[in-house]
Amino acid sequence: MPATRILAGAMLVAGLASPALAEEINMTPAMKTTFEAAIRAHDFQCPVAKMARTQEPAARGDVFKVRCGPDDGSTDVFVFAYRVTLTPGDRLIVEEWN
């Protein structure tokens, strides 16, 4: 997915920044697609984004903890998670969650 489409999707995610921390987000289809595309663009595995939580903002921007899982219609998630940071410049940075 081209970077411009990921950035456009980042703007959709930008509206999620909330003072309430560690709350699960009800992801819209556009938000799921944005998270999935950003995670895959950073060479990580994410068949389907299944859960996302807001986290405390960091120096680089708003932080989300995203869990992916198999594309089998289940609610199963992988044991690992991703840290997705939305920067002030509407860029998404993806790292493994530690």
Image (cartoon, rainbow, N blue to C red):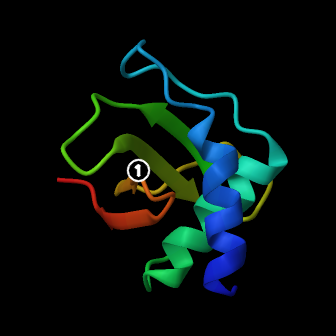
The reply to whether residue 50 is visible in this rendering is: yes
User: In which quadrant will I find the N terminus?
Assistant: bottom right
Q: Residue drawn 65% across and 51% down?
A: 11
The x and y percentages for residue 19 are 41, 14
Q: Residue drawn 50% across and 29% down?
A: 17
On screen, residue 88 above or below 48: above
On screen, residue 62 above or below 47: above
On the image, numbered disc 1 is attached to which residue?
Answer: 88
Disc 1 residue crowd, few under 14, some 14–19, many 20+, Cα 10 Å:
few
Quarter-of-image position of residue 93: bottom left
Q: Residue drawn 54% across and 57% down?
A: 68
The reply to whether residue 70 is visible in this rendering is: no
Q: Judge by depth and name the residue closer to the eye, 16 or 81.
A: 16
Q: Residue drawn 60% across and 56% down?
A: 10
Quarter-of-image position of residue 51: top right
Element type at mark 1: loop
The x and y percentages for residue 57 are 29, 33
The x and y percentages for residue 58 are 22, 40
For this orientation, the residue located farthest to the top is 20
Indicate the amino acid at tag 1.
Pro
Q: Is residue 19 left or right of residue 3?
A: left
On screen, residue 49 above or below 16: below
On screen, residue 39 above or below 56: below
